[in-house]
Image (cartoon, helix red, strand yellow):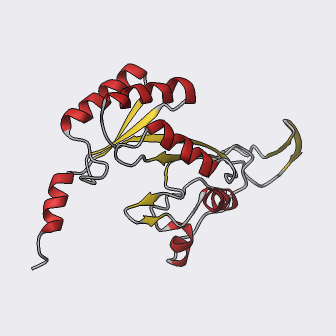
Amino acid sequence: MQDADVYIEDGVIAALAKGRLVIPGGIDTHTHMQLPFMGTSAIDDFYTGTRAALAGGTTMINDFYTGTRAALAGGTTMISALTMFTLIILDFVLPSRNESLVEAYHKWRAWADPKVCCDYSFHVGVTWWGPKVTQEMEELCQVHGINSFKMFMAYKDVWQLNDTELLHAFDACKRLGALALVHAENGDVIKEVSSRDAD
């Protein structure tokens, strides 16, 4: 690794830091800040989660409903590093079944905008299918700059799409030039096995 240590203030190099490394901030493409999920909620909101990311010098936050506080209490550590680059967080907008994707996007923005400590963006979950969804995906891409959508093959009766709905969502992503993400588990098998007695 080449030494390339600089301090930039107002776009101008203000100092050199001999013996230290400048490491660009990464992009965490999978976070769950303030996510309501099956009667629970992620412990980190957009303030605590993004502040922890900045304080740790790394974007590797992946709190999955338990939060960074719980992870730290369990022994997880963060590696601290000096960075002068922008930190970007990508989180998920997950509409309830039959909830407008656009309205869910605005709800998540209202949660995030007053709290975030760094740059951020969203993936939007396609958690149900109907004629309105295609129109809303197009609006999210063209008006709001969303370029990725997540579909679920799990969480039956909550977010799971059937195969035909998945194909419609993939076709919409292709037409819009958006990235299609998939939570790839078999929701039907999970529901069946979960309903069996533990005997």
Residue at the image point whose x is 30% and y is 52% from the top: 158
Relative to 25, does residue 178 appear above or below in the rendering?
Answer: above
Point out the residue furthest to the top here: 175
Point out the residue furthest to the right here: 14
Q: Position of residue 193 (x, y in %)?
A: 14, 64
Q: Quadrant of residue 81?
A: bottom right
- How many labels sit on residues? 0
Q: Position of residue 129 (x, y in %)?
A: 30, 36
**Screen quadrant of the C terminus:** bottom left
Q: Quadrant of residue 172?
A: top left
Residue at the image point whose x is 63% and y is 57% from the top: 53
Residue at the image point whose x is 41% and y is 36% from the top: 149
Q: Position of residue 183 (x, y in %)?
A: 32, 47
Residue at the image point whose x is 41% and y is 31% from the top: 179
Q: Position of residue 54 (x, y in %)?
A: 68, 56
Relative to 111, is 102 on the left or the right?
Answer: left
Along the line of sight, the residue nearer the viewer: 51 or 191: 191
Relative to 197, does residue 39 appear above or below in the rendering?
Answer: above
Relative to 118, is 169 on the left or the right?
Answer: left
Along the line of sight, the residue nearer the viewer: 37 or 102: 102
Point out the residue furthest to the left here: 199
Relative to 86, is 31 on the left or the right?
Answer: left
